[in-house]
Structures are given as structure tokens and as C-alpha cells.
Image (cartoon, rainbow, N blue to C red):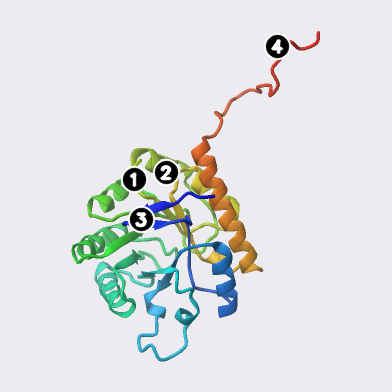
Amino acid sequence: MSDSFLLAGTTFNSRLIIGTGKYRSYDEMKAAHTASGAEMVTVAVNRVPLDGKTESFLDHLNPKMRILPNTAGCYDAEHAIRTARLAREALDTEWIKLEVIGDQVTLLPDNEQTLEAAKVLVKEGFIVLPYFTDDLIMAKKLLDAGCPAVMPLAAPIGSGLGVQNPANLRIMREQLPDATIIVDAGVGVPSDAAIAMELGADAILMNTAIAESRDAAKMATAMKLAVEAGRLAYLAGRMPKRLYASASSPIDGAIK
């Protein structure tokens, strides 16, 4: 299926973005990445060995994949801004997935701190992809700040609960028809990914659902197909829901 999408001037043929954490081995990670067909992978800056002298997951990434550093582990705007600057220096990229966590138990994002950091980083030339709660008003503010896409959560990070507020994502899609929306966090199984895409997401970022499955490569393949299926369904348009039955076969000309 050829259905590319444009993000900050770069064309991607895969609408699945994956991560690097929680894999049981580098070989398992590489196999999953290959099976996913993803072209972009996010890495936590706090996991990047800054000396470049020791073996790390970076040595096992497909060099053709775009690296999207993230600010995981940051709890205020100032820390996230410093981490983004460090990522730019260490990984030679302006791209940053902005995460500012507001609560240590739920790991839900702090939207106010995220917006504050996004405004600073955009002015410094970063391509900021912000992770936030599925809030339409905040999405508008982040886009107005200059973010080329927004990344609303489906559910808390690593929960695997699936899309908890489908109406929010649907409203966001309808109210922001030209925005790039990437669902981030909460996908647990391929049907979750398909639902998010059916609701109009442009892409999905996930990690734990693949890394913690019994067979990461197989799950990566399943997620790839689910994202494609959900996208096709969104483009095709679903049938209307009806309260009562509607016969599939016409009755005109039926034998009486």
C-alpha cells in the first residue's frame, strides 16, 4: 500500500513510528524494527551514551531510519529545553519529541509546561513534536506555537489500554483537518492502532506494545498491517450506524 504522509517537509511511506526501549536484546529490537517497516524511531536522550565510545542501542539501529530523540524523564519546561539542546548536539538533529511529564504515577503530560517548552524550542529552530493529553484547545495552541504536528495520547504511557477517548480524537480530526495528528502512547494491540487510524490519525507512535509482546517481530508486523488497515478504512469511510436492521440483499424481484 502506497500512502505516504508529509511531516515537516519529509515524506514517510510508513505511518508507524516505533521506539527502542524494553526489548530483551538488540537482535530482538532489530528484528522488530525491520518487521514494522517504520522509517522513524524515537530514542530517549537520557539513554544516549554521550561519549560515543561504548556500545549502545544506537549501534543497532537501521541507519536509514530517522532518529527522533525524545525528552522522556523531564518534569518541567526548563529540563525539557536543556535535554532537547543536548539531543541536538549529541545526535545532530533538529527533530525532537517533546515530553514533559506532570505526574510520576500516571506519567500524564503537563500540558502547560509542554507549551512553554515548545514555544522556546520552535524559536530556536527545532522541529517540535509535542506529546500531550487529547485536548483540542491545547492542540490548537501547540500548532499556533509552530509545532508541525501534535501527538495526543490514546492512554497513559505503557498502559496498553487503547484509545480511551475516541470522541476527543474524532473531534480533533474534524476541527483540525489540515493538522498532522500522531497518536502517541496507550496502544496495546493491533485493533487499538486500527481504531486510532480509523478515527483519522495520520500516524501512530508505539513502543511497549511491540517490545513487551512474546514475539516482538510478529507483533511489529501485526501493528504495521493494523495501521495500514485503519488508514484504508478512514479513507474509505465507514457505513452509518443504524438502530435497526437493514437487509443486505435487495428484496425487489424476490420470489413470492
Residue at 47 percent of width and 82 percent of height:
59
Measure the alpha-carbon separation of dots 4 and 3.
50 Å
| Residue 87 in picture, x, y percent from top left | 31, 75
Which mark is in front, 2 or 3? 3
Side (left or right) of 13 relative to 109: right
Which mark is in front, 2 or 4? 4
| Residue 98 in picture, x, y percent from top left | 33, 64
Q: Which residue is mark 1?
A: 136
Residue at 54 percent of width and 46 percent of height:
230
Side (left or right) of 84 relative to 106: left
Side (left or right) of 40 relative to 225: left
Q: Which residue is mark 2?
A: 168
- Which one is nearer the viewer's eye here, 228 or 10? 10
Q: Amino acid at mark 3?
A: Leu
Q: Of helix, strand and loop, which one carries label 4?
A: loop
Packing grade of label 3 (10 A; few <14, some 14-19, many >=20) is some
